């Protein structure tokens, strides 16, 4: 990824997060903007987000982001001052799935090492 893509992605991530908090603080309280990635031609921005909560909260977050997408795009366009404002594509990041996978791997390693740790604990 080029330096320009990285700068644009960081700026978009920060701006989308701040705009959500500023304009829709109650509705976006459980949403965390986790990342932003830019296509090589700078025409599309994939914004990753995570939602704290269950299926109801995730559905509400998807609806909010879908509803305010054009307003966020306009805000981002003003900040970026680029010839073409990139399209925002929101994608939910399954952070909890990744955490669960890492935890299961650590548990498995702990079980394999468990006999060694128990005998050397004294």
Image (tube, helix red, strand yellow):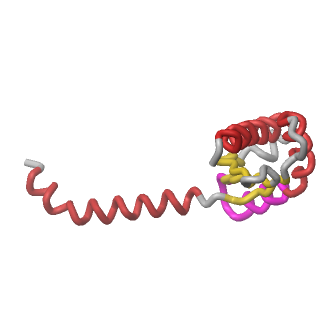
* Main SS, magenta residues: helix
Compared across the picture, whether 54 is left or right of 74 comes to left
Q: Which residues are magenta?
A: 51-65
Compared across the picture, whether 45 is left or right of 104 comes to right
Residue at horizontal 69 percent and vertical 51 percent from the top = 37
Q: Image height check: is 88 above or below 56?
A: above
Query: Which quadrant would residue 104 be assigned to in this image?
Result: bottom left
Compared across the picture, whether 88 is left or right of 4 comes to right
Residue at horizontal 83 percent and vertical 36 percent from the top = 80
Question: Could you tell me residue 31's position as x and y percent?
Answer: 71, 48
Q: Image height check: is 27 above or below 79?
A: below
Question: Could you tell me residue 61's position as x and y percent?
Answer: 78, 55
Question: Could you tell me residue 16's position as x and y percent?
Answer: 78, 41
Q: Image height check: is 61 above or below 26?
A: below
Relative depth, front residue between 53 and 83: 83
**For the image shown, how many numbered marks are present on the structure?**
0
Q: Is residue 118 magenta?
A: no
Relative depth, front residue between 92 and 60: 92
Relative depth, front residue between 71 and 1: 1
Question: Could you tell me residue 44's position as x and y percent?
Answer: 79, 54
Query: Which quadrant would residue 3 be assigned to in this image?
Result: top right
Residue at horizontal 72 percent and vertical 50 percent from the top = 38
């Amino acid at each position: 990824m080029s330096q320009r893509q990285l700068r644009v992605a960081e700026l978009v991530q920060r701006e989308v997060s701040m705009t959500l908090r500023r304009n829709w603080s109650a509705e976006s309280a459980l949403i965390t903007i986790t990342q932003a990635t830019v296509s090589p031609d700078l025409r599309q921005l994939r914004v990753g987000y995570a939602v704290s909560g269950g299926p109801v909260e995730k559905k509400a977050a998807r609806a909010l982001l879908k509803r305010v997408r054009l307003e966020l795009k306009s805000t981002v366009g003003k900040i970026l001052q680029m010839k073409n404002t990139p399209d925002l594509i929101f994608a939910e990041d399954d952070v909890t799935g990744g955490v669960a996978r890492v935890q299961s791997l650590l548990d498995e390693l702990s079980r394999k090492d468990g006999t060694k740790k128990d005998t050397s604990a004294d």
